[in-house]
Amino acid sequence: MNFLEKLAIRLSLTKAEIYMVSILLGFLMLGVIMKNINSLENADLLVKKVENARYRDAEVDSLIQLATLEQTTLKEDVSKEVAAEEKVKAVEKKSKPPSSGKKVFAGTISFNKASNLQLQKIQGIGPVMAQRLITFRTEKGGKVEQFQDFLEVKGISNKKLEVLKQHFTLE
């Protein structure tokens, strides 16, 4: 008795059934091998995608360089504006006759549009108070509607409020 006959007796199968089971197992093994080959091809495609992504990183680097360039340009513009304001201050100081140190401003300013330098022209408002007023205006949404609101600003009393009423318009 050969191996196939012994196996047929043990499994209670005929030779034809054993051949069919063997063929089916062969096809199963062939399917597993084909699946592994496909997964290797997919892995190769993924590797190619990663390599392409590396090349895209160069594009990102160039965008970062552009943003940095724009930021330096912006800094230069701001420094030019600051220099222009300082130049205006210097011209104003030279053109003013020597006084007793007190500011004399007789006009009115629209508070909701005034810059830091314009606020400092008013008597009793220095750089710190001007910055506080601008911060206060920003917190109010860029527009102050009543003079009584100024009493919320640190350093403004009723007396200083009267001075501000003379020089500010709330349009």
Image: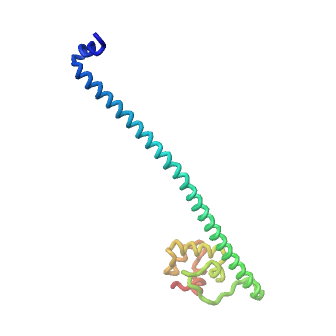
Res 20 quadrant in image: top left
Who's the residue at 64% across and 90% down the image?
Answer: 106
Task: Decide: is 127 above or below 69.
Answer: below
Who's the residue at 26% across and 21% down the image?
Answer: 18
Quadrant housing the N terminus: top left
Who's the residue at 50% across and 74% down the image?
Answer: 140
- Determine the residue located farthest toward the bottom in the rendered image: 106
Towards the viewer: 147 or 111: 111
Res 39 quadrant in image: top left
Q: Position of residue 145 (x, y in %)?
A: 49, 80
Towards the viewer: 53 or 95: 53
Q: Position of residue 75 (x, y in %)?
A: 65, 69
| For residue 108, side relative to residue 87 (left or right) | left
Q: Position of residue 83 (x, y in %)?
A: 70, 76
Task: Decide: is 160 above or below 67.
Answer: below
Who's the residue at 70% across and 82% down the image?
Answer: 88
Scheme of image coloration: rainbow
Towards the viewer: 70 or 9: 9
| For residue 9, side relative to residue 120 (left or right) | left
Task: Decide: is 146 above or below 68.
Answer: below
| For residue 53, side relative to residue 8 (left or right) | right
Towards the viewer: 137 or 15: 15
- Determine the residue located farthest toward the top in the rendered image: 1
Count of numbered circles on the image: 0
| For residue 98, side relative to residue 114 (left or right) | right
Q: Position of residue 157 (x, y in %)?
A: 59, 77
